[in-house]
Amino acid sequence: MGGAVSNDIIEDTQQSVHLSEIGQIALTVHDLALAKDFYQNILGMQFLFDAGTMAFFQCGTIRLMIGVSEKPFSNEGTILYFRVPDIHGVHSTLKNRGVSSVQEPHLVARMKSHDLWMSFLKDPDGNTLALMSEITRTLSEEQNQ
């Protein structure tokens, strides 16, 4: 009876699942060499290693994998958000390095103790990258609201 499926019910142990940490994010690119240069030299990410049609970078505690796809793809669904302390300065520096700006830094939300600012850019393959900055308000700014 090799290969026959048993009719026995397999018990699910109902193990609790709580996904709470991202280990790696993948982005698909058209030109690996161009993308590798961009992420390493323009964005300043730490290059880790190459593996065939993929390159890996360290970005904080998350590994970023960029890879070439053999199939046609659209890169319109994923946005990587990078936390930066000075959104205006970083956005300006990246524009000066030739990075395509989609949206200048702008206030998105006023929170209790800080303002959330974002700006949007494109990598050479058209993937959207966002800069985000949580800017703490001073006591006088909080009192004026």
Image: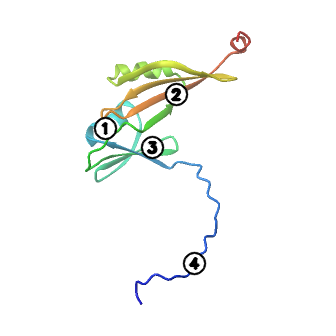
Q: Which residue is mark 4?
A: 9
Q: Earlier in the sequence, mark 4 or mark 1?
A: 4
Q: Residue at x 59, y 22 (%)?
A: 109
Q: Which residue is mark 2?
A: 132
CA–CA distance in space, label 3 to label 4: 44 Å
Secondary structure of the residue carrying tag 3 is strand
Secondary structure of the residue carrying tag 1 is helix
Q: Which residue is mark 3?
A: 58
| 1 vs 2, front mark | 2
Q: Which quadrant of the figure has residue 44?
A: top left
Whether the residues at callouts 2 and 4 have beta carbons within 8 Å, the answer is no
Whether the residues at callouts 3 and 1 have beta carbons within 8 Å, the answer is no
| 3 vs 4, front mark | 4
- Indicate the amino acid at tag 2: Met
- Indicate the amino acid at tag 3: Gln
Secondary structure of the residue carrying tag 4 is loop
Q: Which residue is mark 1?
A: 35
